[in-house]
Amino acid sequence: MIGIILQWHIQISLRFLLIAFTACAVILVAYSVLKIKFQYSFKYFIGFSIQLLIVISGAVLVWMNDVRHDEKWLGHHYNNQKTIVVTLEEPLVEKANSYKALATVHTFYQNDSSRSVQGKIIIYFKKDSSINTLSYGSQIVFAKSLQKIKNSGNPGSFDYTRYSLFSGITHQVYLTATDFEVLPATNQTAFKEIIFACRKWVISTLKKYIAGEKESGLAEALLIGYKDDLDKNLVEAYSNTGVVHVIAISGLHLGLIYWLLLFVTKPLKKVKGTSWPRLALILFCLWAFTLLAGAQPSVLRSAIMFTFLAIGEVIAKRSSIYNTLALSAFVLLCINPFWIWDVGFQLSYAAVLSIIMFFRPVYNWLYVKNKALDFLWKLNAVTIAAQLLTVPISMYHFHQFPALFIFTNFVAVPLSSIILIGEIALCLFSLLPPLATLLGKLLHYLIYWMNSYIEELNKIPFAVWTGFSLSILQSFILIAFVILFCYWLMEKQKMAAWLSLACLVWFIGLRTLSFTNSYRQRKLVVYNVPKYQAIDVIDGRSYHFIGDSILLLDDFIRNFHLNPSRILHRIPKDQSAITMAKHFSFAGKNILIIDTFPITLNKENIDVLILSRDPKLYIAQLAKAFSINQIIIDGSVPFWKAAYWKKDCDSLKIPCHDVAEKGAFVMNL
């Protein structure tokens, strides 16, 4: 993990890595032929060499998996005159205004020459009846220019460019029905055909027997992770109440399947010589479900993790569960080192590790004689234990804490487990319509009850605490505090108590410093929100908003573009926006916003001039009227007009910042 992280941030050359790897390997070989007494003398040096060798291996993996280092990567050979041939790698996914698909680029044509290339792009197709002919494996040719995938650049926003790069995706394009031609040949693999066929069959079966859009949509997400039919408000309710893991197929689902398989095959343990057949049966069922779920990265990771756990139980009954867990993580990172940044990877391993470490101590808090009540307490003990290490990670990524997670998990985890088992049974008995219909009705009511329960709890004002802004350092310190404090409670080690107290003091100190700085901040933020005007003038922990009123009403746009910045700057959620005039002075800076024409032109010094929407004016005209230090072009300005304005600014030597090109403009005042 250290090698992976260092290589990504430092970008060490492959030649240096290979030289260092070879040097460590030579040292280890030389050490192995030394006499025993010399080996003992150099044991620490050799231990360090082994650790360094593993670190270098992680760095090499990152270099090899970075698509930009491939000589055939499309980014090394692309220009706007190229004709491109691509293969669709998945069925089309319907969006609000388009269809989306992942495609692999394999050929560039220019004039009479061709070049074989590699790389992945995202294609957005305009909705049209002719698009229905496209499917997985279709090959299309087009000459439209590719666009690099860029972040919005807004403070605190999700790094979509890095997220796409980790999957080898670097460009995107929007095509209408006249922009491309479909080639007669297709490029498909039997394995992927089986996966997509399985997913299609499962989705159609669930829709056929489970009534209700909300209910069938959640059933699809619960069983195979298909989220395109999920209700957005329902997803938000599950997220706010701390049970979004129920509809994000991952370790919970595979863990339940694994537990069922262990339970069903338990009688085989008593029969001599059945250990390996039992393991084969468990692994076959585990991977069959993985295939049924579409073999997505999240479920693949969980399948590999539980595969190692199953093998470890059979071949080494006394092995440490921590070593087995670490081995599975090691193998996963060898397959794809970029999974270390995946939130699902982090939460899956944090949850499993937390349960292994803390379930038994939490369960021992209460002694319940009644078996049914004891079973319910076990479920809650698992929930509480899992939260101990996952909460800091969730707060870092999602900036919120579900205060009612115990009450929601108390119902959602066992009920979703029953529903999942019922859905598997529904698929198995789908050839018997009467039984399948009965199972479908039962699952409909169970899902309806679970949804209603979650939605009602979500209406409680304090169901979710939002606005948390943790740095990476603060998150690690908080995790260290939890581990050390729990270790002190379990083992009564005084050193652990003092170290946990030190971590707590350190954490509080960092938080106090960050809040102190937030009260002193004075900033102007011009956001990159396509087609909209959005400006925040931040004064301490309050802000003044200037922009389109729709951004105050549309929760999705506001949560995606604006709220991450306000959380980063520690502005309370209940802090209401205060509108301001288009010409104002703040922290000694004279700021003017022009979004209409005509305007009153008075000769004066303007520190920041923000051009918005589509006023009919020329930069030269403004330069004569004002003394301008900086021009900002916001996201509401049409692309063609922004290009003209930037050209004029360049000729007049006026600094210009286009948020659509460079990301949000942030000025510390």
Image: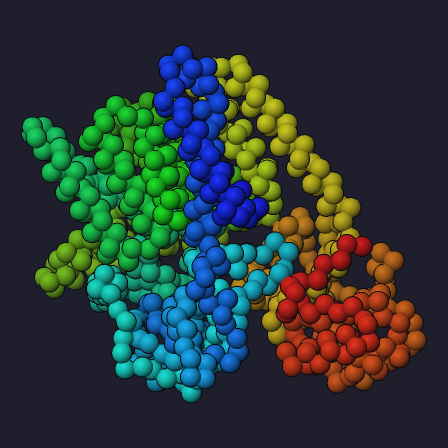
The residue that appears at 66% across and 35% down in the rendered structure is 510
Q: Position of residue 560 (x, y in %)?
A: 56, 61
Which quadrant of the structure image shows residue 506?
top right
Q: Residue furthest top?
A: 37
The C terminus lies in quadrant: bottom right
Q: Position of residue 94 (x, y in %)?
A: 38, 72
Q: Nearer the viewer, residue 33 or 426?
A: 33
The residue that appears at 65% across and 71% down in the rendered structure is 635
The residue that appears at 69% across and 36% down in the rendered structure is 512
Q: Residue furthest right?
A: 603
378 w.r.t. 230: above or below: above
Is residue 373 in sight in this rendering?
Answer: no
Total marks in image: 0
Q: Nearer the viewer, residue 413 or 659?
A: 659
The residue that appears at 24% across and 44% down in the rendered structure is 257
Left/right placement of residue 268 relative to residue 328 reads: left
Q: Nearer the viewer, residue 565 or 163?
A: 163
Q: Nearer the viewer, residue 74 or 233?
A: 74
644 w.r.t. 73: above or below: below
667 w.r.t. 486: above or below: below
Q: Position of residue 408 (x, y in %)?
A: 40, 44
Q: Position of residue 51 (x, y in %)?
A: 45, 30
Is residue 632 in sight in this rendering?
Answer: yes
Color encoding of the figure? rainbow
